[in-house]
Amino acid sequence: MVTYEQVHDPSFSIRERMEALVRQKQKEITTALAAVDTVGFHTDTWERGNGGGGGQSMVLQNGTTFEKGGVNISIVHGKLPAAAVSRMKADHRNLKAAADDGSVNFFACGLSLVIHPINPHAPTTHANYRYFETTDPETNEVQAWWFGGGADLTPSYLYEEDAKHFHQVHKDTLDKYDKELYPKYKKWCDEYFFIKHRGETRGIGGVFFDDFDSKPADEILHIVESSFDAFVEAYVPIVKKRKDLPYTPEQKNWQQIRRGRYVEFNLVLDRGTQFGLQTPGSRVESILMSLPATASWAYDHHPEEGSEEEKLLKVLQSPIEWV
Amino acid sequence: MVTYEQVHDPSFSIRERMEALVRQKQKEITTALAAVDTVGFHTDTWERGNGGGGGQSMVLQNGTTFEKGGVNISIVHGKLPAAAVSRMKADHRNLKAAADDGSVNFFACGLSLVIHPINPHAPTTHANYRYFETTDPETNEVQAWWFGGGADLTPSYLYEEDAKHFHQVHKDTLDKYDKELYPKYKKWCDEYFFIKHRGETRGIGGVFFDDFDSKPADEILHIVESSFDAFVEAYVPIVKKRKDLPYTPEQKNWQQIRRGRYVEFNLVLDRGTQFGLQTPGSRVESILMSLPATASWAYDHHPEEGSEEEKLLKVLQSPIEWV
């Protein structure tokens, strides 16, 4: 039985404390989101098979505020085959320890969410915090470990005050721990969520980091806990403010085109999605939960000069320092 | 000036004859498709820059029969850098000749089309025939060459007579040249358009081939010409028959979900799309013309047992010999 108290109890291992954290935050985040909708979340628990752990997907579809939203946790472990290890090494310099056959004993635990509101004035958002470790197959001692994660905002219409609020809350949270984190993670976010073939970012950014092991694990766990709370504080007030604004069919259409770009990023470029789809035994529905309920592609679409749509596009083409 | 007559004139090179062929077939195919709609095609010509050729995209959007359809030709040439050569070599055993710096002088010419009708009873279709050659940088002599291509059908509702008709026309056409072609290319099609992470094919197949150089180029050019004609004969009567059938909002919704799978295949798995998006200077709008105007993703969607939707899914999960 995993209880919330163990998050802060150093007699538990970091992996146990992270599991307790994501289980608690899934409850809190879905409660906070459901409070701005009249439809609730549907819960699926799933197992990876062969005693390799599993997860719990919570999905809200066809709500009155949210068209589709998913908050997924997974706590998995097992052996990464040599091929997967060498694929991961490209992104994770920390991944060094391996058994004689090139495989790695791993544990991974995280929470990942994507929320697509109905109203084109209310932005889509994504957040994801995760912990990864490898252990010695003989002694079970932790060999390499790191945290990764971030949160970002994808509006169809730019409200500068929303962008500033989202960034400010995340900056304030990270600044409490280390003032060097926000500037670094803000830049990393702009770089990661760049849709190369379109020459634009997916949204107006936020924070993103990976391979974080440069502080004690206990301290990073606290940073991650605060970041989960920052996400709710950053996002929910924006949705409340925008969810009932009037909008035109043309604005809805623009939102659909932006969602098409969201799909392009997630399916063509997102390393997490690609890794998941290539991993045998992974749960495809939980991976592709991130895709919007509806999306659209118009051939060679260009917003009118001076329009609100063009204003957004310009910001996506050259990211801004919001705070 | 490229004229249709040169398709059959052996005093022209194969690349010149293929260019004449795709230019002519773009006209014929768009004319045949426009005849079953009340909206016409919009034409864009584009250049690759640095004298590397270009193409012509013809797109029909928001028609009365077709939601979105594109028929694109491209005639491009230049230098493939060593990195692109080694990526291509994995798929094309024929690609052997290279300059000292590992680069390759290439010429590529093809026609590619994707048509998405409005009516969920009318199937989406894709066809693509192309010629590729590499030349000696000193003498301009052709070193390696091959043809590739195919045509396939993606219904949301299965009409067995349509599937049989589509396959029969292509089989009859190929049988005239060589009875071994259809069975081989039918199987290749089922294998290529398999959405691994879903465990289902994109549609009910058709024909697909690549690296075709085992007959004289002149003969393959004739096969390709006949295949273009087969496509029109195979597809247009199906659309005519289905485009005005009544349908329910639930059927439209199922079509949208199937289109989501279409997007998944094209963005995650299609090698042509990936190669195009990774190639600097390629025209993204022409590559992503294949995406539907609208698509949808529902979390963990399963059709009802015994329904028409389930009937289609079963065929996609284990392909059928239609003729």
Image (cartoon, coloured by chain):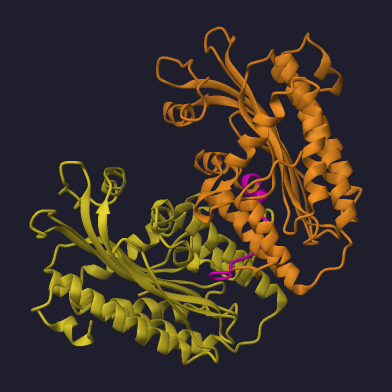
Chain colours: A orange, B yellow
Q: Position of residue B161 (x, y in %)?
A: 45, 81
Q: Is residue B131 left or right of residue A287?
A: left
Q: Is residue A43 left or right of residue B120?
A: right
Q: Position of residue B32 (x, y in %)?
A: 41, 89
Q: Position of residue B270 (x, y in %)?
A: 43, 56
Q: Is residue B201 left or right of residue B119?
A: left
Quadrant in the picture for residue B299: bottom right
Q: Nearer the viewer, residue B99 or A18?
A: B99
Image mark count: 0
Q: Is residue A223 magenta?
A: no
Q: Nearer the viewer, residue B143 or B241?
A: B143
Residue at image point 76% right, 73% down: A249
Residue at image point 49% right, 57% down: B265
Task: Specify whether residue B36 is in view.
Answer: yes
Residue that protrudes farthest toward the front in the picture:
A306
Q: Is residue A295 magenta?
A: yes
Residue at image point 79% right, 43% down: A164
Q: Position of residue B23 (x, y in %)?
A: 30, 80
Look at the image and tell me in which quarter the N terminus of chain B lies.
bottom left
Q: Nearer the viewer, residue B258 or A119?
A: A119
Task: Specify whether residue A109 is in view.
Answer: no
Look at the image and tell me in which quarter the C terminus of chain B lies.
bottom left
Q: Nearer the viewer, residue B296 or B193?
A: B296
A62 is higher (above) or lower (below) than A248:
above
The segment highlighted magenta reads: A286-301
Quadrant in the picture for residue B215: bottom left
A201 is higher (above) or lower (below) than A120:
above
Residue at image point 60% right, 52% down: A317
